[in-house]
Amino acid sequence: MIDDAGNLSIDFLVGFTIFMITLIYVATLIPTLFIGLQSSSIDYDAVAYRTSVILAEDPGMPYNPSWETLPNISDSQILRFGLALSKDTPNILTPEKINRFFCSTEFVYPTDYQSRAVFGDYPYQFNISLQMAGSNVTQSIGDILPEDTIGRSVGTYGYSRRVIKVKEHSNATLDFSNFVVNTGPTPAPPSSLPLGIYTQNATTQDFSVYFNYTYLLNSGPDYNSIAYQINPLAPSGANGLIGGEGALINLTGLQALPKNGATVNLSSISIYKSISEAPLNTVQGSFGGPELPPKNPSQFLLYIDGNTTPVTSLPCNVTSNLSLYIPPGLLSYLGEGDTSTLLNVTMQFQLSQQDWYLNSTQVTPYGAFNYNYTNPNITQPHLEDGVMEVAVW
Amino acid sequence: MVNDRGQLFTIEGVAASMIMLFTTYLVLGATTVYTPGDSHISDMQLEQIGSDALKMMNTPSNCTSTSCVSQLQAIVNESDFTPAGQNQALIDFNTTFLNYVNNRTGSMSDNLHYTANITFRDYTDAANPNSTGSYILAFNRNLTGVEHPVRVTEWVLIGPPNFPQGIVLPRNSGYQPQPRAVLVEVLLWRD
């Protein structure tokens, strides 16, 4: 006997099958969707935070010689970007590292930055920007932000903002515009001259700048904090001509010095070095050198009378001002890592006739303008405010 | 014989289920679900900015062998109990702190609000030498209770002989004339 007892309705079978498929599908889909949504934003924020910490609080790797001084990224010696001055000074960055980091012609976005700052296997897009307070110039690398909203935190992109300071290096500016010769039986230094400057009535005159590495490295303000230190041995590059800290010497108002109408030329710039403290006015007796060719100032940046092209050979006429920039790393290169180095940078001037001009040989105790922490004509290292943002998506 | 056995009467149901399934997929795929747990991210970002700002305010911009005072130290020092001192400290802290926390790269700035106060060991109560005092240092908006602020702090070393200035210390107050630390506490939030 054939009847319909025990048969399943095909409607039931179809419905039940659809229900089960749907249930299984949804059960597997929903967690995947939520995990995907949450993990992306949380991951983006975490990566942005990590990147900002690496950039703001880490000096990078290698540290000495510092990564920003290495000549070429293609040799893969640069392992990690970091803009901090040192690991002990978080949020205090150096201008050399900032400029090298944002050099888009040297580093390729995103590959160089992904492997040295952002890290991770996922091919993130990102934008890193930095702006100094009071400036409308923004340095940045990366893609354009997908959406520029204020205060968003989750969803569009991961974000981290860091308040930073940038260490600006020292410089010496000596203005002679108000120079007046003191009349008297002896050529006393006029009161209108900056501290550490002397003048003499002669045809050949030497103006020396004196760097005492021991003093500079041990007598900095704020318990010798590296943030305010004039550090001639800062990490330098392989060839010694990039990286580290530089020194800028500006001489202005020079036209006021010659009182007898002499014309002046800068005949040489010589560097003498010693490791024992001795007065330089003893004709640099304990000093060896010159260390570099005196007639070839190309190892410096030498600007004369407002000309924007650096002088490449000496002698050269000087009328009103002179700017000598000892580039970052040269002081370190000359010191060869020796903290007891004494360095004397001497500019020699030849006058067309006997006249008053720059002469530091009679200055006590070193016969030179002392580049130190107390001279009022030296703008000491200081910190400028800024902000850095990292966005990752 | 032709009858209705084996016929699918629920084609509408099948179609509806497919549509619902597809709709569910679209909705879930297009929606960002902001769960309570995610709020820690924006809180963390605010804490980071506030902490950085206080730290940078407490880092001197210029330092010489004779003077090395941060903006925050100067503000705390001038924020004594005199009305003039408090007013000047309020202005200085407000300007400096808001510059730090609102500055962004680019032309747009952020819009954060805060209240800041100072907590210090109170030497005026000789009977209770471990008591603390506090007062409001500065603010740019009052807390009404509906905000969701984060708290950031910074210890500040100060050097006046008596803090707050202007108070008369009782005898045997236990105060030692040496640099001491006071706590600057900031509640920071975004509308």
Image (tube, coloured by chain):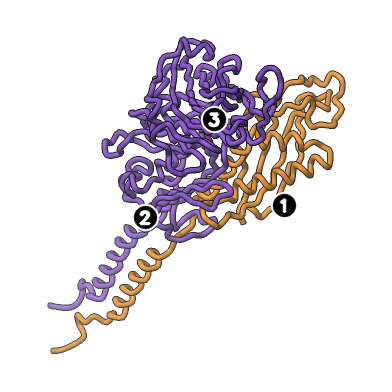
Mark 2–mark 3 Cα distance, whole angstroms, equals 44 Å
Give amino acid for label 2: Gly
Q: Position of residue A208 (x, y in %)?
A: 52, 23
Instruction: Kindly identify the amino acid type of the residue bearing the numbered disc 3.
Output: Ala
User: Callout 3: residue from which chain?
Assistant: A
Closest to the observer, A46 or B9 = A46
The answer to whether A289 is drawn above or below residue A79 in the figure is above
Q: Chain of mark 2?
A: A
Residue at horizontal 65 percent and vertical 51 percent from the top: B113
A40 relative to B44 in the view: left or right: left
In this orientation, which residue lies closer to the viewer: A125 or A156?
A125
Instruction: Report x, y in % for residue A225.
Output: 55, 25
* Residue appearing at x 44%, y 46% in the figure: A48
Q: Where is mark 1, residue-wise?
A: B142
| Residue B109 image label | none
Calculate the distance from the C-alpha at mark 1 to the C-alpha at mark 3.
Answer: 37 Å
Residue under pointer 2: A36
Query: Residue A183, percent across and down?
Result: 71, 24
Tag of residue A227:
3
Secondary structure at numbered mark 1: loop
Q: Quadrant of the N terminus of chain A?
A: bottom left
User: Which residue corresponds to the image point at 42% horizontal and 20% vertical from the top-left?
Assistant: A335
Residue type for callout 1: Asn
**Image quarter hosting the C terminus of chain A:** bottom left
Q: Which chain is orange?
A: B
The x and y percentages for residue B182 are: 70, 31
Q: Is residue A40 visible?
A: no
Locate residue A170 relative to residue A374 in the image: left or right.
Answer: left
How would you rate the neighbour count of disc 3 (Cα within 10 Å): few for under 14, some for 14-19, many for 20 or more? many
